[in-house]
Amino acid sequence: VAGFIGSPSMNFMDVDIVENTGRGITVKSEALDPVTLKTSRFDFAGRKTARLGLRPQYLDVVESGTAGGLHGKVTLVERLGTETVINVELTRGGRIVAALAEDRPLETGSDITLVFDPDKAHLFPVEGEARQASA
């Protein structure tokens, strides 16, 4: 349901769970540097993967090469005056959409790094993933 609310709709990407403590869950992927999210309302004990949900409006551009972000290439730029909507092909596959709060002169084909506030991200269990037994 979360993916249908808002325009553009929420981005989803599969991530690996690096660490799961009582203070948060650290996740990463081929395109995402490790980031710690607040504890989710779902139970991730024993899970190795999750699905990360990011609203396009909560993504922002930082200088390429900046650690702690999503890395990819711009594939489409829609400059709408007060907002710029971009499509990004993530490093090693996957796509996301970012709705930037201002008119940005971005170039198709350019490398880009996007960041987000971890408190505004959503983490969902991957359907069908069996939990791993604790050692």
Image (cartoon, rainbow, N blue to C red):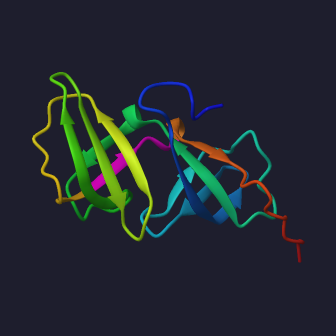
Q: Residue furthest bottom?
A: 135
Q: Position of residue 97 (x, y in %)?
A: 37, 43
Against 80, residue 41 (above or below) is below
Q: Position of residue 103 (x, y in %)?
A: 14, 30
For the record, the magenta segment spans 113-118
Question: In the image, is 61 to the left or to the right of 131?
Answer: left
Q: Quadrant of the C terminus?
A: bottom right
Question: In the image, is 52 to the left or to the right of 63?
Answer: right
Viewer-side residue, 14 vs 45: 14
Q: Position of residue 49 (x, y in %)?
A: 67, 63
Q: Position of residue 71 (x, y in %)?
A: 33, 61
Main structural element of the magenta stretch: helix, strand or loop?
strand
Can you tell which quarter of the image residue 104 is in? top left
Viewer-side residue, 40 vs 105: 105
Q: Quadrant of the N terminus?
A: top right
Can you tell which quarter of the image residue 99 is in? top left
| Residue 114: in magenta span | yes
Can you tell which quarter of the image residue 83 is in? top left
- The residue that appears at 30% across and 41% down in the rendered structure is 60
Viewer-side residue, 94 vs 39: 94
- The residue that appears at 38% across and 32% down in the rendered structure is 57
- The residue that appears at 27% across and 61% down in the rendered structure is 66
Against 112, residue 97 (above or below) is above
- The residue that appears at 66% across and 56% down in the rendered structure is 50
Question: In the image, is 74 to the left or to the right of 45?
Answer: left
